[in-house]
Amino acid sequence: MMRNTNQNNIIKVLLLSLVILSGCASEKQYFYYAYYYDEHAEPESYFVRVISIDGEVRHEEEFWVDENGVLEKEGGDLLIKTSTGLNKRKLENGVHIYSPYLDISKNECVEFKYSDASLNDFASTTFCFIEKKDIVVNGMKYHDAYRFKKIVGSNNGVVTDVYLDENFILISQECTEGERAYYRIDRVDSAFMFQSLKLNKAKSNLALP
């Protein structure tokens, strides 16, 4: 019972930290992810995606979590959810606009490019909708998840197999080809993340919180 209480307290502290770091908004959702660098190994790291809803705009922020539970903000995006996909904000000729980012209603792939051509070599994205599919990730069942082929970068881009839920929020992403090492991202629950962090601490002889 004490172990569960300590774990719950850690989660509450983390959520409070996320609220402070990500600022105020009308609504917040928290999604936890494990990052794997080997197909059959244990997770190497974790991050939390905080989604704030303000009117029609969705603000997504990522916070990496180290073995001590310390948060480090990685980045964020501004998006607008449509009935069939997402539009993403970018700077175009000095003006912020929202351009199509992904769409399940289109037969062709959706390419998102920046006005700065130098960014497109490594940061442009192409989403190609493949199918709806029932999947299981870390024991959680997802019905009719949206499966996409995602390509990042215009030159020798990295290709990943991506699954999104009904709100176009990441479930799983796996690198399938391209000039980078293998990785996989899977959605987990907070209890899984903290349990695994405790195991890592034990291996590293770090004090538990």
Image (spheres, rainbow, N blue to C red):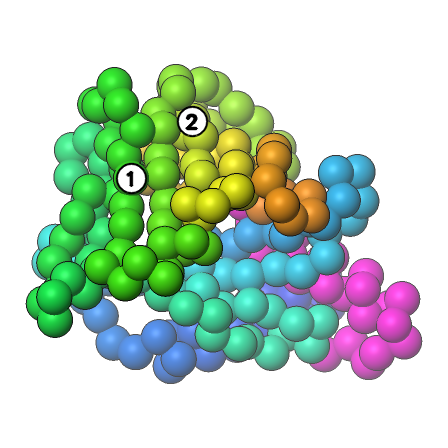
Taking 131 as reference, is 174 left or right?
Answer: right
Residue type, numbered disc 1: Glu
Spatial CA distance of label 2 from label 1 is 16 Å
Mark 2: secondary structure = strand
Which numbered circle lies on residue 147? 2
Percent of width and height locating residue 21: 39, 80
Which mark is first along the chain, 1 or 2? Answer: 1
Point out the image quarter for the C terminus: bottom right
Per the rendered image, the range of residues in magenta is 186-209
Is residue 148 placed above or below 48 in the rendered structure? above
Q: Residue 19 lies in what quarter of the image?
A: bottom left
196 or 85, which lies in front?
85
Residue located at (71% from left, 71% from top): 67
Residue located at (44% from left, 30% from top): 149
Taking 99 as reference, is 102 left or right?
Answer: right
Mark 1 packing: few (<14 Cα in 10 Å), some, or many (20+)? some
Which numbered circle lies on residue 111? 1
Count of marks, rendered view: 2
173 or 176, which lies in front?
176
Percent of width and height locating residue 199: 81, 61
Which numbered circle lies on residue 7? none
Taking 49 as reference, is 192 left or right?
Answer: right
Residue 203 included in the magenta stretch of the image: yes
Point out the image quarter for the N terminus: bottom right
Residue type, numbered disc 2: Arg
Mark 1: secondary structure = strand
**Residue 109 in view here:** yes
**Residue 163 in view here:** no
Taking 173 as reference, is 82 left or right?
Answer: left
